[in-house]
Image (spheres, coloured by chain):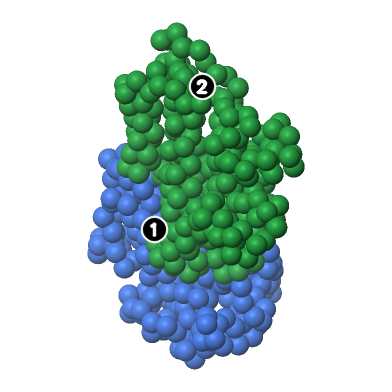
Amino acid sequence: MMEKKNIQTVIQATRLSKSFNKVQVLKELSVDFNEGDRIALIGQNGAGKTTLIRCILGQYVYDGQLRVLDKNPRSKRVDILKEVGFVPQIPPPLKITVKELLRFFSDLSNVPKEEYVDIAEKLGLEIKNSYNKPFVALSGGMKQKLLVSFALGKKPAILLMDEPSANLDPAAREIFFDYLSKYNKEALLVLSSHRMAEISGLVNRVVEMDFGRIVLDKVLEPLKN
Amino acid sequence: MATGFKSILVLDLNQSLRSKGFWIYSILFGGFVAFMFLSGITETQIIGFVGLGRLMVTFMQVCMVIIPIYVLITVVRSIVGDKESNVMEYMLSLPVSLSDFYWGKFIAKFIVTYIPLFVSLLGAVIWGTITSLDIPWDMFALYSFLLAAMVFCFLGIGMFISVYARSQEMAISTAFVLWLLLVAFIDLLLMGMLLKFRVNPSLVIGLGMLNPLQVFRVGVLVLFDPKLTVMGPAAYFVLDTVSRGVFIVFSVVYPTLLGFLFGWLGNRRFNRKDII
């Protein structure tokens, strides 16, 4: 008889609420994200996707309960974030050079910068030609490729990506999706996107949000390819 | 040193060194010292002071006018600006503690604001040595500490405002109003209080001494004008209450502590509320 593996809950939200100026953006949301889940987090603008991601990243105080890797994301932020790779929707306008940014990431994550360079080059970024350029001066696609490299390079247990492919050209998008499809199967992957069709081949679960609530949570059939 | 603190410190220093504002600021103060030498200010006299001492006093008077508002306007945009530009969302998705992020930025801003001022003063001393002027080492030491204390003080206040402000516009407006109030409380409002409400003069001078700008001004004066004659009757109250030596220590310690208090309060709020 085959031994059944225990699947661990990586993120557990219980009656999670978040308000801004008395407007409730997350409304007593309860959901579990598990090891090996590849989730498409979908919903219209204002549905609460980014707010949920920011709560997981420990950037907001909230009502209700939220556990990430069985820890409180606010009080154990640093411990949790060591295990998280994040790609934001809008790249930050950093004035420092690519070289300095690489050193910064390498120091913080204890990952040799060659690892990041390797992934960036696989995504089609000629990073060595851009070493002395300020990050802010790179094109949208180049910035995105670099941020994706930083997120993937440290091989995190949780990958949170907010519209990660929005600025990628079709070739880079294909390589990126291929990379994600082969990424550690035990990791939790949360892809926030407006375009379900684009990421449908990558995910095994769809969570749809609307007005701060989860309106659909569906496990998909295993992919044949 | 914590990795997060060091990484943010280095990152913020690198960001500042790339901004034109930093170089304009550095050249402005360095150029001002050079201009004073060229204009022959070291040969003029003020209350018996000539040479490099005269130059340093003028330099400090200019710093008193420019530095507080410069520090406030540049620093208040720091945290709230990072929030608005999505820098914060990304940087704080990395394993850096909130305190490391806050104090890393704080110390980086202190370094890039203070070092150009110190280098300008030091440059004056070096040029004075080359041109065989007498070097007033006591003034150089006190003014170096006073500048550090003033920068630290307004940096703390600026970071505090930056954490609380909801937008950069609001932060800048608050900083400007605060600066106007502090300037007004150096003389005008205090004299108004004395005349209009017949308030106890000790209380009015006590209030004046809570104003870091006033403390800095008196601290600058007290070394070359030991009896504070340029301050008029208020000097009697100040020097009757504390000795000159005690006031010199106070003029450095008080603004530093005030800056630290506001910095600490800002960090406390930053750790407890929404980051973005």
Residue A35 at x, y percent in the picture = 59, 70
Q: Say which quarter of the image contains residue A162.
A: bottom left
Whether residue B124 is situated above or below residue B6 in the rendered picture:
above
Crowdedness near tag 1: few (<14), some (14–19) or many (≥20) residues, C-alpha within 10 Å: some
**The chain coloured green in the image:** B
Q: Residue at x 47, y 89 (%)?
A: A211
Q: In this image, B196 relative to A93: left or right? A: right
Crowdedness near tag 2: few (<14), some (14–19) or many (≥20) residues, C-alpha within 10 Å: few
Q: Count up the numbered dots.
A: 2
Task: Give the chain letter at badge 2.
Answer: B
Which residue type carries mark 2?
Answer: Gly
> Which residue carries the number 1 mark?
A92
Whether residue B271 is situated above or below residue A37 in the rendered picture:
above
Identify the colour of chain A in the image: blue
Residue B85 at x, y percent in the picture = 39, 62
Whether residue A5 is situated above or below residue A207 in the rendered picture:
above
For label 2, the SS is loop
> Which residue carries the number 2 mark?
B48
Q: Say which quarter of the image contains residue B95.
A: bottom right
Question: In which quadrant is the C terminus of chain A drawn?
Answer: bottom left
Viewer-proximal residue among A81 and B159: B159
Q: Residue at x 48, y 34 (%)?
A: B60
